[in-house]
């Protein structure tokens, strides 16, 4: 199965350093059939446009404002990143939910703004350790999906990739087991079937993120329930990320 590989740079690297990263990744993934998407900081998107257009590597941002434009100092709109050729945006990342108090209502508004501007959304969902310990992970993630996708139509789901990112794994170096991942992916597909249709549940693209590394990516990627990976810290080494991107193809 063709997989989706998404690189989340978080707040790392510089635009100048990204130039050689983009060049290397584009060269290394030239004949690769997997879908490769890089999401560097906003400041790198100009460089992404210059280096990645016409290659196998798509690019996107890690956030957008929920508003289209206006008096909001320091914010970046969907149309601004779209204008730079970005086709994707990561929304609902647990780091933003926690640090900037982005709640489901705001995330829902951001998703609507992104889709209205022709951006595809990588929607991150996932339970924290306390939730997991209390065996409430599935309920928590189902609620996130219901709130985050409220008012989104079934035909718009083509533009949504759901990233299962357990908060107890993200940035910790500790990944979830394939059993844990499969259980949650099944929950996600069931919830989407319940909210929309069985067809929507089956065809939804679901990726896993949380401490994916060169040492564990193969095992996770081989999981047939999954459509791909969202790679954080391990994507910063372009050679390593390129190896992941070429897997199976
Ligand atoms: P990590 O991050 O791979 O560094 O755990 C994943 C993410 O935040 O998307």
Image (tube, rainbow, N blue to C red):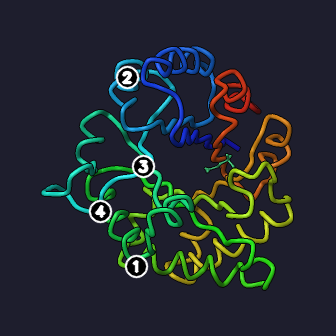
Mark 2 lies on residue: 47
Q: Which residue is mark 4?
A: 66
Q: Quadrant of residue 27?
A: top right
The residue pinned by badge 1 equals: 150
Q: Position of residue 196 (x, y in %)?
A: 49, 78
* Contact between labelled residues 1 and 3, with CB atoms less than 8 Å apart: no
Q: CA distance from mark 3 to mark 4?
A: 12 Å
Determine the CA span between mark 4 and mark 2: 24 Å
Q: CA distance from mark 1 to mark 2?
A: 35 Å
Residue 3 placement (x, y as % from top left): 66, 43
Give yes or no for contact between labels 4 and 2 (Cβ–Cβ under 8 Å): no
Asked whether mark 1 and ligand 1 are closer than 8 Å, the reply comes as no
Task: Read off the residue under disc 3.
Answer: 89
Name the element at disc 1: loop
**Mark 3 secondary-structure assignment:** strand
Image height of 199 relative to 232, above or below: below
């Amino acid at each position: 199965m063709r997989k989706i590989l998404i690189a989340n740079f978080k707040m790392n690297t510089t635009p100048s350093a990204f130039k050689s990263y983009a060049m290397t990744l584009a060269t290394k993934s030239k004949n690769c059939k997997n879908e490769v998407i890089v999401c560097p900081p906003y400041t790198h998107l100009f460089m992404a446009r210059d280096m990645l257009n016409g290659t196998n590597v798509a690019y996107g941002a890690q956030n957008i404002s929920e508003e289209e434009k206006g008096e909001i100092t320091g914010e970046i709109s969907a149309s601004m990143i779209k204008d730079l050729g970005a086709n994707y945006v990561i929304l609902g990342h647990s780091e933003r939910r926690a640090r900037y108090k982005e709640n489901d209502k705001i995330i829902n508004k951001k998703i609507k703004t992104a889709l209205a501007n022709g951006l595809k959304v990588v929607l991150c969902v996932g339970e924290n350790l306390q939730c997991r310990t209390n065996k409430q992970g599935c309920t928590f993630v189902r609620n996130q999906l219901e709130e985050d996708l409220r008012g989104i139509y079934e035909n718009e789901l083509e533009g949504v990739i759901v990233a299962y990112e357990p908060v107890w794994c993200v940035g910790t170096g500790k990944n979830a087991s394939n059993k844990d991942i499969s259980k949650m992916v099944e929950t996600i597909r069931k919830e989407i079937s319940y909210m929309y249709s069985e067809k929507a549940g089956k065809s939804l693209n679901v990726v896993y993120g949380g401490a994916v590394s060169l040492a564990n990516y193969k095992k996770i990627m081989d999981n047939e329930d999954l459509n791909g990976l969202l790679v954080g810290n391990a994507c910063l080494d372009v050679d390593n990320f390129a190896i992941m991107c070429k897997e199976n193809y």
